[in-house]
Image (spheres, rainbow, N blue to C red):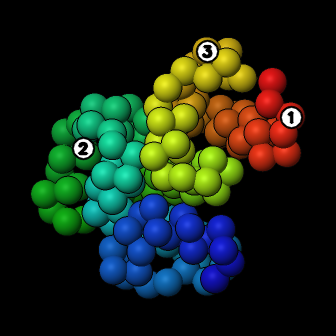
Amino acid sequence: MTESGQRVAEVLGGSKILGQRPHNTDDWMSLIETGLPAAAAEALKEVVGLDDPSLATTLGVSIRTLARARAAQGRLDSVVSDRLYRLARLVAIARVVLEHDDKAVHWLTHPQPGLGGRRPIDLAKSEPGAREIENLLLRIEHGVYS
């Protein structure tokens, strides 16, 4: 597994929750198409310190949908799984760039000047927002913070 894929898997609870160790893009695509376990959303929620309403909003589902999936110990649909993977990828990147889990969580959940004063977690709802977050993190990593 690539290092970045391993970091994303860690954010989602590792092989214990995912049921396997994704080794490459095809493995991740298969997992997402099948649907990530609802427990992976819970793992990410714990890592980032989100409450249910914030997680549901970021994933684009209702709190009830999230609660039902959790209670049934089921799988999320492929669209929600893709959003969860996207958020986990951003968390993993922030952890590497900011070199500390607590700093990464703080950065993701507080307004950032480089994002027009918006919170990264709020922008992570869409692919364009996620790209903007990733670009800012890459600029920070290379010392070109703006």
Q: Amino acid at mark 3?
A: Gly
Q: Nearer the N terminus, badge 3 or badge 1?
A: 3
Q: Mark 3 or mark 1: which is in front?
A: 1
Locate the N terminus by quadrant.
Answer: bottom right
Counting residues from the start of the chain, the first of labels 1 and 2 encountered is 2
Farthest left residue in view = 71
Q: Secondary structure at mark 3?
A: loop
Left or right of residue 52, residue 108 in this image: right
Label 2 vs 3, first from the N-terminus: 2
Of residues 142 and 62, which is closer to you in this image?
A: 142
Q: Regarding mark 2 in the picture, which secondary structure is present there?
A: helix
Q: Residue at x 50, y 84 (%)?
A: 21
Query: Which residue is label 1 attached to?
Result: 144
Q: Position of residue 99 (x, y in %)?
A: 61, 54
Neighbour tally class for label 2: few under 14, some 14-19, many 20 plus, Cα within 10 Å: few
Element under disc 1 = loop
Closest to the camera, between mark 2 and mark 3, is 3
Q: Tell me residue 101's x, y (percent).
A: 49, 52
- Distance from the alpha carbon under mark 3 to that under mark 1: 17 Å
Q: Is residue 1 left or right of residue 122?
A: right
Residue drawn at x 42%, y 63% as measured from the top left: 12
Q: Which label number is shown at residue 65?
A: 2
Q: Is residue 74 above or below residue 65?
A: below
Q: Nearer the viewer, residue 2 or 34?
A: 2
